[in-house]
Amino acid sequence: MAWEHLQSRLLHSFKIFNLIIDKVRNKKTGQELDLVMVSGPDAANVICLTPDGLLVMVRQYRFGTREWTIELPGGLVEKEENIEKACARELLEETGYKAERWQYIGKVPSNPVFMDSYVHHFIAWDASYVQEPQLDEEEVMEVQLVSMDELAAAISSGDVSHPHTLSALMKAKGDFVFNFAKKLD
């Protein structure tokens, strides 16, 4: 390892993240740096498919970019919560959909440049609408059912550009990806 971790210091604790200053040393040169890090919980998102092959997505406002995004439903994993249960909970809360069959397809770093968390990806099969969404007070979103043709067009146009949505779609395995890739041609 090129860098040696010397210490971590809490700079500020926010509602869901901690701002940390990590002091590190380059083992080769001896140079020391203070790096700002964001420490927080992992997240989970879900590729949710209805029995007729539609993808359940959400359109929501994102404060970081000050723009509306179209993305997969998901959210933060609560402390001591099983990741699959977190995914099912977020899907139900954000969309009102529930699925009995789940498949884990992997994880990616949230942002390895300055964050210590991961986003876990699942596929939920044969989902059905069972209740009205139960949104948190800071969430403003609407559910959108999207065909694979519409998804391919939205990715090509840039309307679907959230990196965690794109990484989940790329990690998906089997006929889903094969059929999706054909739509992009």
Image (tube, grey):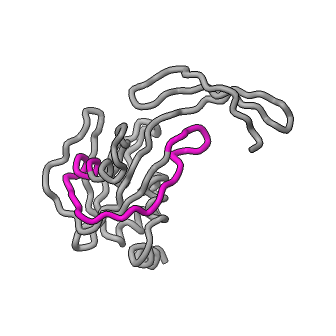
The residue closer to the viewer here, 40 or 59, is 40
**Picture coordinates of residue 10, whole percent (x, y):** 55, 22
- Residue at 48% of width from left, 55% of height from top? 107
Name the spot of residue 176 as percent of width and height, x first: 39, 74
Which residue is located at x 74 percent, y 44 percent? 1
Q: Closer to the camera, 72 or 160?
A: 72
**Residue 130 within the magenta-colored segment of the rendering:** no
Q: Is residue 145 above or below residue 67?
A: below
From which residue to which does the magenta span run? 89-117
Quadrant in the picture for residue 47 = bottom left
Percent position of residue 158, x then y: 47, 58
In the image, residue 74 lies at what x, y percent?
A: 34, 49
Position of 162 relative to 183 (above/below):
above
Up the image or down, 183 lies above or below 55; here it is below
Residue plotted at (46% across, 75% down): 181
Residue 27 location, quadrant: top right
Q: Is residue 7 left or right of residue 123?
A: right
